[in-house]
């Protein structure tokens, strides 16, 4: 059965788009690789920006200027103005549907200052902001009887002979069967690609750029793929994220000598480079929140304490937290216009897989949750409007015959272990396409990725079962990751000058 709007991804952006499309009168179906409550949105801890002025004076114009400054000239001012102007409305909507924001003593939504902000602007729910937003959105979708199918993996997008979208080819992970989901429009909300850095990423293992790779295969344009944000405070041994809220609440960054070496609330690219410089000089780097006190930490940063205890065996109340900068957020993605429409007719995108030109070369802390709400709503409404346009061909299921990658897989051998190569790519990219980049090393990385793509038929899957074949899913993810890696390193080579998160050194 054909649906009006097919949404691929059930994180904050996808669920917001689903609610907006349903509210606009469209029939909606949501497909997700995992489960909604396990999406990357739950890892966004620090807060969501909006110039409410609840704690100290602030303005939408200041929010706009902070965002543009952080973007290093790579953002579209019109898009930034729209996002920042819509921020108070987005917070009001989330508040209305039940997000339990932390409050000031007089009952207003509490706000904290994050890096690059001129005022306390991030609305938060302790340090579980993304998690609480995500759960509220999911509950709202259930209340609205929105159709959600879990454990559905995107293999490819389906198009008609004229190039317009007509649905998606999906692998049912549970059964191993292929499914064709036909739709008048498709919204990609499939997340970013920072897991190409493997263990050097704060993101879940699902952040493999599947939607971006699938969109590129049908001709969608990509933009800004070289811009990968490294978060200053990933735990040293696990890369688990310690939220910027820890620094926003007054945490210090110290080296082995106990010295503060950087403004902790400078933009993330600056702080990450400063940390990297310390480590290259032989120093260890630590986050210090001991001076905030146990009561404050347990009230405002409970998750950070739990994570440090669990993954580093240190108690932030009395111990320093060992940290390093790791890949966290990908500013690049599928290029979209001001209605979230991609270059492929009927295909929309929102969230981290899309490039709405609001983050530019360096995302401002607190703007990611804002983006998924503002542009998730925009994408849902735009996709619904597209389906209602007077075009009878949208009801026709004359999709082009797809070339199924699973059929090709049958001829692949197992001479090379792709798991080893996946780890190798993570190391390669962290060292040579990471915080600091050199042209010679980028060229080496490009050559390695091209070689791995050529060797892909020598890899393959050992598990031939159909039901819950994670070996198969992970191999297809690896195929997508190589496509994304190629796009990242090619874009990095094209940009010769340093710009925000893309920092070029001689060599």
Image (cartoon, grey):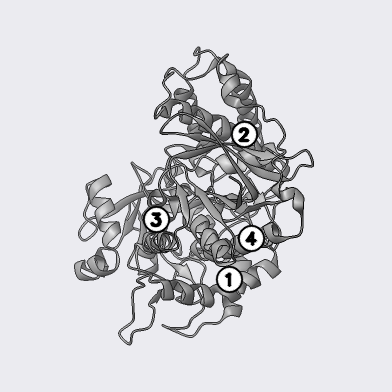
Q: Classify residue 114 by image quadrant.
A: bottom left
Using the image as rendered, state which of residue 346 and residue 64 is in the foreground: 346
Up/down of 27 relative to 190, above or below: below
Residue drawn at x 55%, y 16% as measured from the top left: 410
The answer to the question of whether label 4 and label 2 lie on touching residues, with beta carbons closer than 8 A, is: no
Of labels 4 and 2, the one closer to you: 4
Disc on the earlier residue, 2 or 3: 3
Residue on which the image places disc 4:
384
Report the number of discs: 4
The N terminus, quarter of image = top right
Q: Secondary structure at mark 3?
A: helix
At 67% from the left and 44% from the top, the residue drawn is 166
Q: CA distance from mark 4 to mark 1?
A: 33 Å
Circle 2 Cα neighbour tier, 10 Å, few/some/many (<14 / 14–19 / ≥20)? many
> Furthest residue to the bottom?
106
Give the crowd class for mark 3: few <14, some 14-19, many >=20 residues within 10 Å: some
Mark whose residue sits in front, 2 or 1? 2
The answer to the question of whether label 4 and label 1 lie on touching residues, with beta carbons closer than 8 A, is no
Q: Residue at x 70, y 69 (%)?
A: 78
The disc at residue 42 is 3
**In the image, what residue occupies the spot 44% across and 46% down?**
203
> Where does label 2 land, which residue?
483
* SS for callout 1: helix
Secondary structure of the residue carrying tag 4 is helix
In this rendering, the label closer to the viewer, 3 or 4 = 4
From the top left corner, tell me how far across and down residue 229 is, in percent: 53, 51
- Per the model, the C-alpha gap separating discs 1 and 3 is 25 Å
* Separation of marks 2 and 1 at Cα, in angstroms: 33 Å
- How far apart are labels 2 and 3 at the CA level? 27 Å
């Amino acid at each position: 059965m054909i649906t009006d709007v097919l949404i691929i991804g059930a994180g904050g952006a996808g669920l917001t788009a689903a609610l907006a499309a349903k509210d606009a009168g469209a029939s909606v179906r949501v497909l997700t690789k995992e489960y909604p409550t396990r999406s990357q949105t739950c890892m966004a801890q620090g807060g969501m920006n909006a110039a409410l002025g609840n704690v100290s004076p602030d303005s939408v114009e200041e929010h706009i200027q902070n965002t543009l400054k952080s973007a290093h000239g790579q953002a579209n001012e019109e898009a930034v103005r729209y996002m920042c102007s819509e921020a108070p409305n987005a917070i009001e909507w989330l508040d209305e549907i039940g997000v339990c924001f932390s409050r000031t003593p007089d009952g207003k939504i509490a706000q904290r200052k994050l890096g690059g902000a001129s005022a306390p602007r991030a609305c938060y729910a302790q340090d579980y902001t993304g998690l609480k937003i995500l759960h509220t959105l999911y509950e709202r979708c259930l209340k609205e009887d929105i159709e959600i199918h879990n454990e559905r993996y995107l293999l490819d997008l389906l198009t008609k002979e004229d190039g317009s979208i007509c649905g998606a080819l999906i692998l049912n992970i549970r059964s191993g069967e292929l499914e064709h989901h036909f739709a008048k429009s498709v919204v990609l909300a499939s997340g970013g690609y920072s897991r190409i850095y493997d263990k050097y990423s704060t993101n879940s293992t699902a952040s493999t750029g599947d939607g971006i790779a699938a969109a590129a295969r049908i001709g969608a344009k990509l933009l800004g793929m070289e811009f990968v944000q490294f978060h200053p405070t990933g735990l040293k041994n696990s890369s688990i994220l310690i939220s910027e809220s820890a620094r926003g609440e007054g945490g210090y960054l110290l080296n082995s000598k106990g010295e503060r070496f950087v403004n902790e609330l400078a933009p993330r690219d600056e702080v990450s480079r400063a940390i990297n410089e310390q480590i290259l000089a032989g120093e260890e780097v630590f986050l210090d929140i001991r001076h905030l006190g146990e009561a404050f930490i347990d009230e405002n940063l409970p998750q950070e304490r739990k994570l440090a205890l669990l993954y580093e065996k240190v108690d932030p109340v009395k111990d320093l937290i060992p940290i390093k900068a790791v890949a966290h957020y990908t500013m690049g993605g599928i290029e979209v216009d001001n209605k979230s429409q991609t270059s492929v007719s009927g295909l929309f995108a929102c969230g981290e897989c899309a490039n709405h030109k609001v983050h530019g070369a360096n995302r401002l802390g607190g703007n990611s949750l804002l983006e998924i709400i503002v542009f998730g709503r925009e994408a849902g409404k735009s996709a619904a409007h597209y389906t209602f346009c007077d075009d009878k061909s949208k009801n026709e299921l004359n999709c082009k015959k797809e070339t199924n990658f699973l059929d090709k897989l049958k001829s692949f051998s197992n001479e090379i272990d792709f798991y080893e190569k996946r780890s190798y790519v993570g190391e390669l990219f962290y060292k040579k396409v990471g915080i600091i980049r050199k042209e010679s090393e980028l060229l080496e990385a490009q050559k390695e990725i091209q070689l791995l793509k050529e060797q892909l038929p020598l890899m393959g899957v050992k598990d031939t079962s159909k039901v819950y074949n994670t070996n198969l899913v992970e191999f297809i993810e690896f195929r997508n990751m190589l496509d994304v890696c190629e796009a990242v390193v090619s874009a990095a080579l094209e940009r010769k000058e340093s710009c925000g998160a893309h920092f070029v050194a001689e060599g």
